[in-house]
Image (spheres, rainbow, N blue to C red):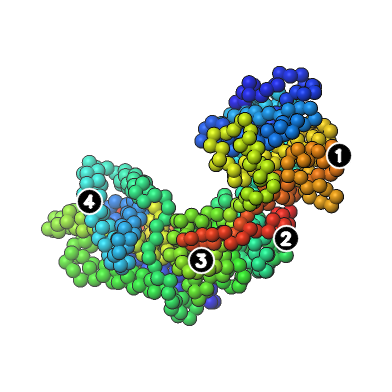
């Protein structure tokens, strides 16, 4: 349920007075099993609000972070959404909802026409078209996109997609296939593995006969062990280069597959796609880090959020919303929302800024700006999604980062 | 054609695992009239014991033997202290099935509580492969085939050439008559449970080797195929179970060529349904009818 008291200015008149406080509402679980989502949203909101307010606010308004607890329950979230929308006149942006309640509250939030920054990785939103919905963290399927980009970057043109049936694979599988095709690659075998089978020799034969240069793969540990043991057997001891998801970095998975094909083969031929944050040296992250600790309001154990992709993205979202208001000279969401995409995209004639203060100053001088914040270049696509930053990590007993996956190729693969 | 032969190789391996499992399942049923749905979980428990052995330095094939012995002893104890008291109280056939379902769940969750939800693994060699035409076998797979065939032959020798085997067949055919003829029926029933557990334990380790992993639901996954093999051969018919194992094992792999691999297990269900429709007594009629399982 939303707490009216948690929404300062909720009782204010519908027409905003100059100097009134505009709220960024974190509409996520603050109680229940996913209560940690609440602090995650606030951990980005607090430094963003601090950065804006310490620069004098936006168009005479101060920003504030407020909360609406969905309890992580799709049913409880509906009255919370209704309460939020009853006082929507002072709401500049919504951080959330999470995957827990996004489907049940979507019809309500869509009507509000307020910039809504999802905390939901569901594949339903990969190609969404609502102009007010934004997702600045990678979708669940982004690892599949990263596989496609990494394969393209390394010159592979023929790939086999091998994915276990299941919810995670439903996102990764199509994403890797569509992404690789979008980058000019060819999927020579598209194989589904049903976990729990005594053998996968038919599926393995399909892969072997297709002669792929690279395999895109996701499956549970036991299924993977059986599949790769048989691939090793039927392909004369040769396992082609294989790109796997973050699940394959778990020790259980590594033990299973290294037991089936040998640790040297695993270390040599496998790479896992892992979500990565940009280096802590980039100016946008440095500004965020300063604001995170300088803000009088902090979440508990704030240090654990300094490299969290959600924290960074919500900080960036808060700054983008404020800059959009400046650029459109309006605090009306229906007006400033349309400026967010352009502000996040560098281009010819644009001044790249890394802080709200610098962006507001440039806009005041009539310049066009592009904000590159704590997350680095977001590369937001036309569906208001980001590919996110990913790194390839070696598999084995001593995993290490091989290199970052090309963000440009990921954006192209996800388009 | 190459794919058919390649799948035949894997089918022979699967059949070799099904052989001891289906023999154990049907041997125990024929002697006791208890349809043991917990058989798959007993296999899994033994497979985990095999894992414990290998993780303490015991060789893989010795671990298989020890897991089989553990399976036999556990099976005997379960019968003596859990199932027999229920039977003495006159629990019905279906009541016993429900008890074995409960036993299956208890074993499964006990395994998960002890070893966790993650799979465990045997130390396997990743060495060479033996090619026979389009078929290929790893060293471990060849040993699995050898063990499967050896256990089937040993069962045949036991039943055909020993007094104990003849007594088992007598109890399976008509227990009251066998008792009246001086056959120590209780001892034979104990032996049937022990042999069943041993076969299941060995099959559990063989399955873990073949899958390259051991999970706490592993045995249950194979239970449908084991039952299908037993029904195809005729419930309670050991030789029928042997034939059923070969047919189901090969069919599982070959059907994956026609169907998608994901739907291959349907072939086992299809065989189960077709056999029950056309020949409810299975290929080797006899015990099923005697036990009242089939008309």
Are the residues under badges 1 and 3 in a single subunit?
yes
Q: Which residue lies furthest to the left in this view?
A: B182
Classed neighbour count for the residue bearing mark 4: other residues with Cα under 10 Å, few (<14), some (14–19), many (≥20): some
Q: Are marks 4 and 3 in contact (CB under 8 Å)?
A: no
Q: Quadrant of the C terminus of chain A?
A: bottom right
Q: Where is residue B99 in the image (x, y as percent from the top left)?
A: 31, 44
Are the residues under badges 3 and 2 in a single subunit?
yes
As measured in the structure, the alpha-carbon distance from the residue carrying label 1 to the one carrying label 3 is: 54 Å
Q: Are marks 4 and 2 in contact (CB under 8 Å)?
A: no
- Residue on which disc 3 sits: A267
Asked whether A347 or B198 is in front, the reply is A347
Classed neighbour count for the residue bearing mark 1: other residues with Cα under 10 Å, few (<14), some (14–19), many (≥20): few
Are the residues under badges 1 and 4 in a single subunit?
no
Q: Residue at x 70, y 40 (%)?
A: A317
Q: Can residue A133 be seen in this view?
A: no
Asked whether A354 or A371 is in front, the reply is A354
Residue B67 relative to residue B135: left or right: left
Q: What element carries label 2?
A: helix
- Residue on which disc 1 sits: A365
- Residue on which disc 2 sits: A182
Q: Up-down: is B201 above or below B157?
A: above
As measured in the structure, the alpha-carbon distance from the residue carrying label 3 to the one carrying label 2 is: 29 Å
Determine the image quadrant of residue B119. bottom left
Q: Position of residue A236 (x, y in %)?
A: 50, 76
Instruction: Of the two numbered discs 1 and 3 on the same chain, state the one appearing first in sequence.
Output: 3
Q: Which residue is drawn at 48% across and 54% down?
A: A250
Kindly identify which numbered label has been placed on residue B77: 4
Q: What element carries label 3?
A: helix
From the viewer's perspective, is the residue at label 3 or at label 2 nearer? 3
Instruction: Of the two numbered discs 3 and 2 on the same chain, state the one appearing first in sequence.
Output: 2
């Amino acid at each position: 349920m939303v707490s009216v008291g948690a929404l300062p200015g909720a009782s204010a008149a519908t027409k905003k007075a100059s100097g009134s406080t505009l709220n960024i509402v974190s509409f996520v679980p603050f109680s229940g099993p996913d209560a940690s989502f609440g602090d995650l949203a606030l951990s980005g909101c607090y430094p963003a609000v601090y950065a804006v307010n310490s620069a004098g606010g936006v168009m005479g308004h101060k920003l504030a972070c407020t909360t609406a607890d969905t309890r992580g329950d799709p049913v409880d979230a509906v009255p919370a959404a209704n309460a939020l929308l009853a006082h929507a006149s002072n709401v500049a942006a919504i951080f959330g909802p999470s995957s827990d309640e996004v489907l049940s509250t979507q019809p309500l939030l869509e009507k509000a026409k307020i910039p809504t920054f999802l905390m939901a990785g569901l594949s339903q939103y990969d190609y969404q078209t609502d102009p007010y919905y934004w997702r600045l963290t990678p979708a669940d399927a982004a690892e599949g996109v990263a596989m496609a980009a990494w394969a393209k970057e390394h010159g592979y043109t023929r790939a086999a997609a091998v994915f276990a049936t299941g919810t995670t694979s439903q996102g990764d599988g199509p994403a890797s296939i569509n992404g690789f095709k979008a980058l000019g690659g060819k999927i020579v075998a598209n194989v589904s593995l049903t976990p729990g089978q005594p053998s996968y020799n038919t599926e393995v034969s399909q892969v072997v006969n297709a002669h792929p240069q690279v395999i895109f793969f996701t499956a549970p540990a036991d299924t993977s062990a059986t599949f790769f043991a048989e691939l090793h057997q039927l392909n004369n001891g040769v396992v082609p280069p294989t790109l796997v998801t973050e699940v394959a970095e778990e020790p259980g998975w590594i033990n299973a597959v290294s037991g089936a094909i040998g640790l040297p083969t695993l270390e040599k031929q496998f790479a896992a796609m892992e979500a990565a944050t940009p280096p802590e040296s980039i100016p946008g992250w440095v500004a965020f880090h300063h604001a995170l600790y300088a803000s009088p309001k902090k979440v508990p154990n704030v240090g654990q959020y300094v490299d969290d992709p959600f924290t960074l993205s919500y900080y960036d979202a808060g700054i983008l919303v404020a800059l959009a208001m400046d650029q459109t000279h309006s605090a009306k969401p229906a007006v400033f929302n349309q400026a967010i995409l352009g502000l996040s995209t560098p281009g010819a004639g644009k001044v790249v800024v890394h802080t709200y203060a610098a962006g507001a100053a440039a806009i005041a001088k009539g310049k066009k700006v592009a904000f590159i914040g704590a997350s680095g270049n977001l590369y937001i696509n036309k569906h208001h999604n980001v590919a996110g930053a990913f790194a390839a990590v070696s598999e084995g007993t001593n995993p290490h980062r091989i290199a970052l996956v090309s963000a440009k190729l990921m954006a192209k693969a996800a388009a | 054609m190459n794919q058919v032969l390649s799948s035949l190789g894997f089918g022979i391996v699967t059949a070799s695992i099904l052989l001891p499992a289906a023999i154990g399942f049907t041997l125990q049923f024929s002697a006791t009239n208890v349809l043991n749905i917990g058989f798959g979980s007993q296999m899994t428990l033994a497979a985990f014991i095999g894992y414990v052995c290998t993780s303490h330095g015991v060789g893989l094939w010795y671990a298989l033997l020890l897991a089989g012995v553990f399976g036999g002893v556990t099976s005997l104890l379960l019968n003596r202290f859990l199932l027999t008291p229920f039977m003495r109280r006159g629990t019905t056939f279906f009541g016993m099935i429900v008890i074995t379902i409960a036993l299956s769940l208890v074993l499964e969750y006990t395994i998960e509580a002890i070893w966790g939800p993650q799979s465990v693994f045997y130390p396997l060699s990743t060495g060479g492969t033996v090619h026979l035409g389009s078929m290929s076998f790893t060293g471990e797979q060849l040993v699995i085939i050898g063990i499967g065939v050896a256990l089937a032959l040993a069962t045949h020798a036991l039943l055909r050439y020993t007094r104990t085997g003849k007594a088992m067949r007598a109890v399976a055919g008509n227990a009251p008559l066998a008792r009246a003829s001086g056959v120590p029926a209780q001892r034979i029933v104990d032996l049937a449970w022990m042999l069943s557990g041993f076969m299941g334990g060995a099959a559990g380790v063989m399955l873990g080797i073949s899958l390259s992993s051991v999970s706490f639901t592993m045995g249950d996954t194979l239970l449908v195929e084991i039952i299908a093999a037993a029904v195809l051969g005729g419930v309670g018919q050991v030789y029928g179970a042997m034939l059923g194992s070969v047919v189901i094992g090969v069919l599982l792999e070959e059907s994956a060529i026609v169907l998608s691999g994901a739907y291959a297990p349907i072939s086992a269900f299809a065989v189960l349904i077709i056999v029950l429709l056309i020949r409810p007594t299975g290929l080797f009629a006899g015990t099923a009818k005697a036990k009242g399982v089939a008309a």
